[in-house]
Image (tube, grey):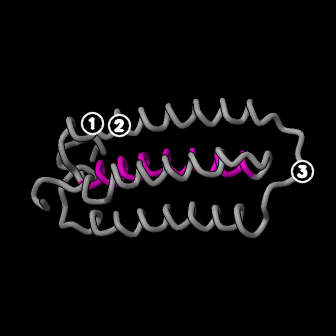
């Protein structure tokens, strides 16, 4: 059986088991960012480093723009391709990982430089992407 075959178990709508995992994955990814933010902002604080603040701001901004645009493109393409639970879970994890990655990069930038913008802006963008792409946004039409 080919995984790309329409009758493949990977491509069928299924019985809803995968879509039940979306809130758990969402919470796990968000919890990781929140935990890392608490550790970096409260427990550890900025380190003495000779890393250029300007360079890290530019790198984070580039990653943030790409992550935001890519999340929208991937979500739209997934929606246009039709609903399958496997596609929904894969798309959700990919979009949330983009949000998580830019947040980790920004918070690590804060850790290395002490730049408050690199502490606040990544968390704001992470919150925006999580609100823009909640678990319900990846469910099929039958679950609406």
Q: x, y (%) of residue 92?
A: 36, 51
At numbered mark 3, what does the secondary structure look like: helix, strand or loop? loop
Q: Please identify the quarter of the rendering in which residue 35 is found.
A: bottom right
* Dot 2 and dot 1 residues touching (CB under 8 Å): yes
**Earlier residue among tags 3 and 2:** 3
Q: Is residue 86 visible?
A: yes
Q: Which mark is residue 105?
A: none
**Earlier residue among tags 1 and 3:** 3
Task: Name the residue carrying label 3.
Answer: 48
Q: Please identify the quarter of the rendering in which residue 127 is found.
A: bottom left
Image quarter in which the C terminus is found: bottom left
Q: Which mark is residue 72?
A: 2
At numbered mark 2, what does the secondary structure look like: helix, strand or loop? helix
Q: At x 80% / y 55%, what residue is drawn?
A: 46
Q: At x 59% / y 51%, what residue is drawn?
A: 120
Q: At x 33% / y 49%, what residue is drawn?
A: 132
Q: Main secondary structure of the magenta part?
A: helix
Whether residue 89 appears in magenta in the rendering, the answer is yes
Task: Name the residue carrying label 1.
Answer: 76
Residue farthest front in this picture: 116
Q: x, y (%) of residue 70?
A: 42, 34
At numbered mark 1, what does the secondary structure look like: helix, strand or loop? helix
The stretch of residues the image draws in magenta is: 85-110
Q: x, y (%) of residue 9?
A: 24, 55
Gap between marks 2 and 1 measured at Cα = 6 Å
Q: Is residue 9 visible?
A: no
How many C-alpha atoms fall within 10 Å of the one at disc 1: few (<14), some, or many (≥20)?
A: few
């Amino acid at each position: 059986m080919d995984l790309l075959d329409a009758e493949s178990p990977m491509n069928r709508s299924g019985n809803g088991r995968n879509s039940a995992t979306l809130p758990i994955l969402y919470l796990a990814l968000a919890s990781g960012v929140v935990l890392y933010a608490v550790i970096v902002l409260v427990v550890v604080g900025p380190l003495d480093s000779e890393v250029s603040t300007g360079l890290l701001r530019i790198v984070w901004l580039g990653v943030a723009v790409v992550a935001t645009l890519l999340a929208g493109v991937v979500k739209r393409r997934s929606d246009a391709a039709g609903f399958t639970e496997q596609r929904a879970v894969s798309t959700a994890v990919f979009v949330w990982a983009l949000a998580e990655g830019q947040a980790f990069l920004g918070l690590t930038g804060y850790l290395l430089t002490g730049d408050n913008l690199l502490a606040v802006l990544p968390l704001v963008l992470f919150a925006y992407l999580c609100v823009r792409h909640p678990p319900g946004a990846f469910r099929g039409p039958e679950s609406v």
